[in-house]
């Protein structure tokens, strides 16, 4: 059952279209990957799905959340779904978190906002979430400030914040791009776990095909604002229909293949 | 934190030293014999010598300098050339006017300007927000003494609601009359300071609004005003505290002009009279004291900033 | 008279939304600001060759008269034509404003560049000095100088110039430091480019627009400072006209001749608002390219 659906989404700035006629849907437990280069409009699409586009941009089409069209809706209407039905995690957790507020309190925030918990209950739940995202020594870490944590730990906090009120759809906009490769893998594993545990549907946005391909079941490819390919992961990777998707897959394969031959040579 | 306090206090003493020296040298070592400029043309050499002796300029410069520094430490600011009274006493006598004036304007500016500034930032596209910003621009451009004159004209002369100036002879013994004389001066200074503060708060709020953590809060369901309230004050506080230090210094200096407009017997008018009469000890002492106040305020601001933002503590 | 306060506001003026268009020369702030400033400048320049009456001309019979055909802005308590005085006051304001800003930049920019370019020790020393000078307010400096040298245009220019130079030095140092940390400067240094060449080729082209905006705003500060000093009797001495002194003289007769107070005040306001709008407009005009690049990178 589709939780989030967009039809014919178009975003323009000063008459210039940045996103053109994008349509797709997301249900609980879905794993959808959105691939595109910088400037393809994927981040704008993500923001539009939460009604968080910067002022000055115009949108048209439909954004259905639980069946209700939210496109152009007043902020009041959006607030009812943000954090509760749909959530988002951003690329750089250092700037996405309040630098002067302990992380535990930041996680507790949405719990108090949406579920009306009192301070101590919310704090307790926040520590539980810290544990759930595998933060070491959760009770102590919850009192730390963002700059005292590592990049990977900060992103775990961001995930906890986004999932605290159990939304049914999570949008992850380049969540691992700013992290080291080893940490990337850990976060991807964590995402996998969380999807299984909470049943949330995931929209994973990235420019990195290998990363997305590992996690996603369905793939969307965007280029200069348009959706050029859409299909199950294996289909898109093995039998890409559009030229662009073919290029992407070939380039990704070439880049990952380059690493292996030199390793083999050194082995001898 | 403690070691920082020690270091900062040492810096303060250093700057007080530099300020005191600057005041001394600007008045003495630059070309122009103060004694000669003080007296009218045609004074007898004896009179000039007498002044020189009183000022101490008949001694070598370094000796004078040492004397001045020693005096500073003991709190002796010399005697006025014209009234022969100790400078410190004269200054003390003026404080009951200037201190309430400066402090009230300072507090009132904050109370008025902060909400207006935040409003102007949040509603910057609306008509009211633009109107507020424009008014603030105007407030900055109009000289404070002009505002004072207009205020006096409207309130004191046309409507006769409050006294046009002056301060009761009896000082604060009659608090009602004293307060009445301060209402217009405080209001004028508040308008001038408030305008600048509105623009500053507006900028700081815009800065916070553009931060990503505000976007994160909104993505979790917070409304913009609530997100601002949750994250704004703590993050904006560091820069705002800095401006408050400057604001306090500004209020103090503003009293010089305000006291002239409203004929108030405060520190500012003492300084002005000293400058006009070329009363060196008065000018020296008052300028040094005002500068010292500004420097001390700077120290307090620094300490408060570090208390507010723990990240500053991590760097030395 | 709150130089440090106004300067602090300008330096952290946050920029508006990311989706702002490129206005080019059609920025309303720039146009309006330039128009206002040019109007005042025109008044000042015209006064060099013509004014309704001579600067010392008095008409004792028509003292404190209101605006009329003979006296467009009325007369003051000595019977002098106020419009003439306003024009001549404009000349004083423009001249002192320009001279003070020039002094401030001649002192401040090299100091700032030196602090940014030299090693850490020199930088800390200069920063320390700047901080102390900033704490030493322009007004007090002016009063000290007047005590020694007496009130004059030169003293006013020096005091205001030195006072503003501290903030100019601070801004220059911060802007130049930012450029120094850029990769292209590092690349230039590894090529062996001397510090002077770096300054000329890389630093100045990148900071001149910030400094230009600052100059516009500093001009406004200088005009208000001059008016304040003249009001207190510490600025341009008579008979040279000054808006500030016009206000001081008109204060006692405000109930009888309010226009003598309103007009000089408006003159100052128009000049300062004009120059502030010009500064804001310049910032919009000169920075959009940088902002657009930043926006593109964000997406």
Image (cartoon, coloured by chain):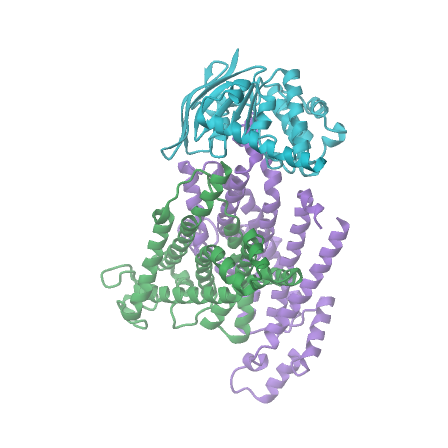
Chain colours: A cyan, B purple, C green
* Farthest-out residue, bottom: B45
Percent x, y of residue A46: 50, 27
Please tell me whether residue C278 is drawn above or below residue A13 in the rendered image. Answer: below
Percent x, y of residue A243: 44, 26
Report the number of discs: 0
Would you say A78 lies left or right of C277 here? Answer: right
Would you say A197 lies left or right of C243 here? Answer: right
Is residue A116 visible in the rendered image? The answer is yes
Please tell me whether residue B215 is drawn above or below residue C252 in the rendered image. Answer: above
Percent x, y of residue C289: 43, 47
Is residue C64 visible in the rendered image? The answer is no
- Front position in the image: C126 or C138: C126
Q: Quadrant of residue C116?
A: bottom right
Residue at screen point 58% across, 81% down: B33
- Front position in the image: A134 or C135: A134
* Farthest-out residue, left: C69
Please tell me whether residue C296 is drawn above or below residue B278 in the rendered image. Answer: above
Q: Quadrant of residue C111?
A: bottom right
Residue at screen point 49% across, 64% down: C105
- Front position in the image: A8 or B61: A8
* Farthest-out residue, top: A1
Percent x, y of residue C139: 53, 63
Looking at the rendered image, the quarter that the C terminus of chain A falls into is top right
Residue at screen point 46% across, 30% down: A41
């Amino acid at each position: 059952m589709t939780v989030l659906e967009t039809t014919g989404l178009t975003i323009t700035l000063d008459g210039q279209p940045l996103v053109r006629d994008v349509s797709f849907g997301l249900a609980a437990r879905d794993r959808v990957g959105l691939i595109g280069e910088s400037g393809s409009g994927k981040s704008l699409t993500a923001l539009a799905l939460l009604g968080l586009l910067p002022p000055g941009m115009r949108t048209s089409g439909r954004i259905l959340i639980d069946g209700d069209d939210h496109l152009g809706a007043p902020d009041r209407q959006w607030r009812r779904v943000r954090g509760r039905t749909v959530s988002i995690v951003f690329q750089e957790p250092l700037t996405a978190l309040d630098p002067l507020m302990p992380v535990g309190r930041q996680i507790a925030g949405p719990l108090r906002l949406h579920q009306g918990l009192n301070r101590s209950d919310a704090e307790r739940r926040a520590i539980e979430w810290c544990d759930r995202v595998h933060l070491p020594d959760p009770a102590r870490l919850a009192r730390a400030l963002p700059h005292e944590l590592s990049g990977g730990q900060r992103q775990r906090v961001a995930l906890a914040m986004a999932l605290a009120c159990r939304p049914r759809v999570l949008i992850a906009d380049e969540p691992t791009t700013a992290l080291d490769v080893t940490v990337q893998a850990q976060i991807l594993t964590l995402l996998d776990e969380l999807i299984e545990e909470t049943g949330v549907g995931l929209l994973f946005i990235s420019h990195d095909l290998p990363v997305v391909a590992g996690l996603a079941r369905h793939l969307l490819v965007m280029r200069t604002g348009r959706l050029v390919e859409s299909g199950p992961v294996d289909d898109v990777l093995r039998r890409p229909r559009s030229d662009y998707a073919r290029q992407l897959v070939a380039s990704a394969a070439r880049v990952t293949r380059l690493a292996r031959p030199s390793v083999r040579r050194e082995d001898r | 934190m403690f070691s920082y306090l020690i270091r900062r206090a040492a810096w303060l003493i250093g700057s007080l030293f530099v300020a005191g020296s600057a005041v001394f040298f600007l008045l003495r070592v630059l070309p122009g014999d103060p004694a000669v400029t003080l007296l009218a043309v045609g004074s007898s050499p004896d009179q000039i010598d007498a002044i020189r002796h009183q000022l101490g300029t008949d001694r070598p410069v370094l000796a004078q300098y040492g004397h001045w520094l020693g005096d500073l430490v003991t709190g002796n600011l010399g005697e006025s050339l014209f009234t022969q009274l100790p400078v410190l006493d004269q200054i003390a006598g003026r404080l009951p006017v200037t201190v309430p004036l400066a402090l009230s304007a300072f507090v009132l500016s904050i109370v008025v300007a902060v909400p207006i500034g935040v409003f102007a930032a949040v509603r910057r596209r609306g008509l009211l927000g633009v109107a507020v910003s424009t008014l603030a621009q105007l407030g900055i451009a109009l000289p404070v003494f002009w505002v004072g004159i207009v205020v006096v004209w409207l309130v004191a002369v046309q409507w006769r609601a409050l006294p046009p100036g002056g301060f009761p002879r009896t000082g604060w013994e009659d608090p009602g009359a004293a307060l009445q004389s301060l209402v217009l001066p405080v209001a004028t200074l508040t308008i001038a300071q408030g305008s600048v503060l509105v623009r500053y708060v507006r900028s700081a709020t815009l800065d916070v609004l553009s931060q990503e953590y505000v976007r994160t809060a909104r993505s979790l369901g917070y409304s913009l005003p609530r997100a601002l309230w949750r994250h704004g004050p703590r993050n904006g506080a560091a820069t705002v505290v800095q401006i408050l230090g400057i604001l306090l210094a500004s209020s103090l200096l503003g009293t010089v002009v305000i006291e002239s407009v409203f004929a108030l017997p405060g520190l500012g008018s003492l300084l002005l009279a000293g400058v006009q009469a070329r009363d060196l000890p008065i000018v020296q002492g008052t300028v040094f004291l005002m500068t010292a106040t500004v420097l001390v305020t700077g120290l307090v601001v620094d300490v408060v900033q570090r208390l507010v933002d723990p990240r500053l503590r991590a760097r030395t | 008279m709150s130089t440090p306060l106004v300067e602090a506001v300008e330096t952290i003026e946050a920029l508006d939304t990311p989706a702002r268009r490129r206005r080019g020369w059609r920025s309303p702030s720039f146009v309006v600001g330039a128009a206002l400033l040019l109007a005042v400048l025109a008044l000042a320049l015209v006064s060099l060759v013509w004014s309704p009456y001579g600067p010392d001309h008095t008409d004792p019979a028509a003292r404190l008269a209101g605006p009329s055909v003979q006296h467009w802005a009325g007369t003051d308590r000595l019977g002098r034509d106020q419009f003439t005085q306003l024009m001549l006051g404009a000349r004083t304001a423009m001249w002192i404003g320009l001279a003070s800003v020039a002094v401030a930049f001649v002192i401040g920019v090299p100091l700032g560049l030196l602090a940014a370019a030299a090693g850490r020790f020199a930088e800390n020393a200069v920063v320390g000095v700047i901080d102390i000078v900033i704490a030493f307010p322009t007004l007090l400096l002016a009063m000290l100088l007047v005590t020694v040298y007496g009130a004059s245009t030169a003293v006013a220019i020096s005091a205001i110039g030195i006072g503003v130079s501290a903030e100019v030095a601070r801004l220059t140092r911060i802007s130049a430091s930012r450029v120094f940390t850029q990769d292209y400067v590092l690349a230039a240094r590894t090529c062996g480019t001397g510090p002077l060449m770096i300054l000329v080729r890389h630093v100045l082209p990148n900071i001149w627009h910030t400094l230009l905006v600052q100059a516009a705003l500093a001009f406004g500060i200088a005009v208000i400072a001059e008016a304040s000093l003249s009001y207190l009797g510490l600025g341009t001495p008579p008979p040279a006209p000054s808006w500030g002194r016009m206000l001081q003289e008109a204060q006692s007769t405000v109930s009888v001749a309010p226009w003598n107070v309103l007009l000089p005040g408006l003159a100052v306001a128009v000049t300062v608002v004009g120059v502030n709008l010009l500064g804001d407009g310049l910032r919009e005009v000169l920075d959009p390219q940088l902002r657009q690049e930043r926006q593109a990178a964000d997406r």
